[in-house]
Amino acid sequence: MKNKHYDVIILGGGAAGLFCAFTAGQRGQSVLVLDSSNKVGKKILMSGGGRCNFTNLDIQPENYLSANPHFCKSALNGYNQWQFIEMVEQHKIAYHERKHGELFCDESAKDILKMLTDECAKAKVVIQTKCAIKTVSVLDSGYSIKTSQGDFESKSLVIATGGLSIPTMGATGFGYEIAEQFGLSLLPRTAGLVPFTFSDKSKQICERLSGLAVDVSMSVNATSFRENLLFTHRGISGPAALQLSSYWQPGQTIAVNLLPDMDARDLLLGYKNNSAKSLLRNLLSQQLSKSLVLELQNLYWQDHAEKPMAEIPDAALFDVASHLSDWRLKPSGTEGYRTAEVTLCGVNTDHLSSKTMECKTQPGLFFVGEVMDVTGHLGGYNFQWAWASGYAAGQYV
Ligand SMILES: Cc1cc2nc3c(=O)[nH]c(=O)nc-3n(C[C@H](O)[C@H](O)[C@H](O)COP(=O)(O)OP(=O)(O)OC[C@H]3O[C@@H](n4cnc5c(N)ncnc54)[C@H](O)[C@@H]3O)c2cc1C
């Protein structure tokens, strides 16, 4: 039987794959999307707590990690957040802004997926799910793809299989295998936007404080984020920890400023001057939750716990202040791909055109979305990269 022929075959029907599919379809290309999962766009459905943080009002190249920080610029300019917002409005999807310019659906992430699949249907894109890809090979005129649902040929092949996070949602390393098959190098992948875990005494502290959120500034190396930190049974999570995890290397210590809006030394000296008879824990409980203050007291001023402020030497107060503004925590690791929102690194962008996402050494082969070495911050940046890179490739396939 003759293989079915399409102009474009896209492997992976996630955010980037679907966007690329209808962009190409709108140009009159015949497009087939093949996905191994039982339905497309699963990560969209689970994103943003079911409301999909689909973009951000302030998208800058600085919000992306990549070995080549310039690579993302062209695509992000070629299809920006305002264009996506316009599409969301055309589809009459109600949305709202949360903090830091993050845009979420009012109702459900299903609305965003429906918008993408409706656009695909309009552009006559064919979508096949539960399709296992067996082999990909090069023909004189394009590509041959052998699958569990038959064999297909196309002029262009787009790899949109995403990263490794949440394997239960259908994540596989397939895109990386294809990259290697065509001689493209991979940058070592790790879990990003992921909670930290501990094995030292901090683990018990986190367990006891589990559920508590604190507004902090958190840093590692020269990078810091001002956001909420959430204690969990396993360690720390919340936006501050998730953001920082993308910059953390195993073995590194992270610094937490528990009083980001004030000078801790001035605060404690002020307590001593103005509330000489009070206990430090009672005064500090005006700034931080009582349970956290008790944990810190056990760690840093147990000997002075029952002394009135007047009796605590300045040097001891300065020592406590340094821990409040620079609380050092040494994670033993992260929760890994099981709960990570993204995969850091991936296909080396040196091999790809930043304008078209096409492989420089393999004409007709494109990579879009998370599979490549471009990873956004938390806050809608990863979806904007999926839309923008999908659009860039969709214009050229
Ligand atoms: C829990 C969670 C919440 C998130 N929330 C947000 C958010 O609110 N905002 C944001 O910007 N980002 C969020 N992200 C990140 C965002 O979902 C991803 O960055 C984005 O989906 C990447 O798009 P993609 O198309 O490259 O990959 P994906 O959307 O992961 O799509 C890849 C597709 O390829 C398919 N596939 C995989 N292997 C194969 C194979 N071998 N053969 C065929 N098909 C295959 C998969 O089934 C899937 O459909 C979240 C991620 C997670 C895990």
Image (cartoon, rainbow, N blue to C red):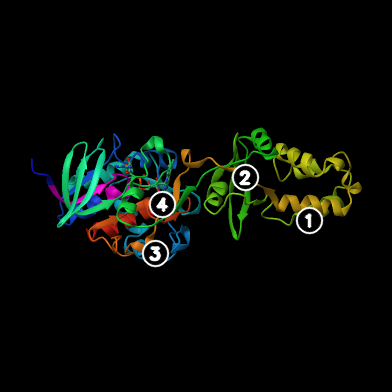
Q: Position of residue 33 (x, y in %)?
A: 23, 45
Relative placement, left or right, of 163 versus 62 is left
Q: Which residue is mark 1?
A: 265
View quadrant of ligand 1: top left
Residue at image point 39% right, 59% down: 348
Question: Which of the labelled discs sits on residue 331, or is there none?
Answer: 2
What amino acid is at disc 4?
Asn
Specify which label sits upstream in the sequence, 4 or 1: 1
Q: Secondary structure at mark 1?
A: helix
State the CA–CA distance, disc 3 to disc 4. 15 Å
Can you name the residue that lies furthest to the right here? 311
Badge 4 residue CB within 8 Å of ligand 1: yes
Nearest to the observer: residue 298 or residue 151:
151
In the picture, measured across the screen, residue 13 lies left or right of residue 372, that is left
Circle nearer the N terminus (3, 2): 3
Q: Is mark 3 within 8 Å of ligand 1?
A: no
Q: Is residue 245 visible?
A: yes
The disc placed on residue 71 is 3
Taking the spot 17% from the left edge, 57% from the top edge, the residue there is 27
- Element on which disc 3 rests: helix
Question: Picture coordinates of residue 197 (x, y %)?
Answer: 59, 40
Q: Residue 262: where, in percent of width, then height?
A: 71, 56
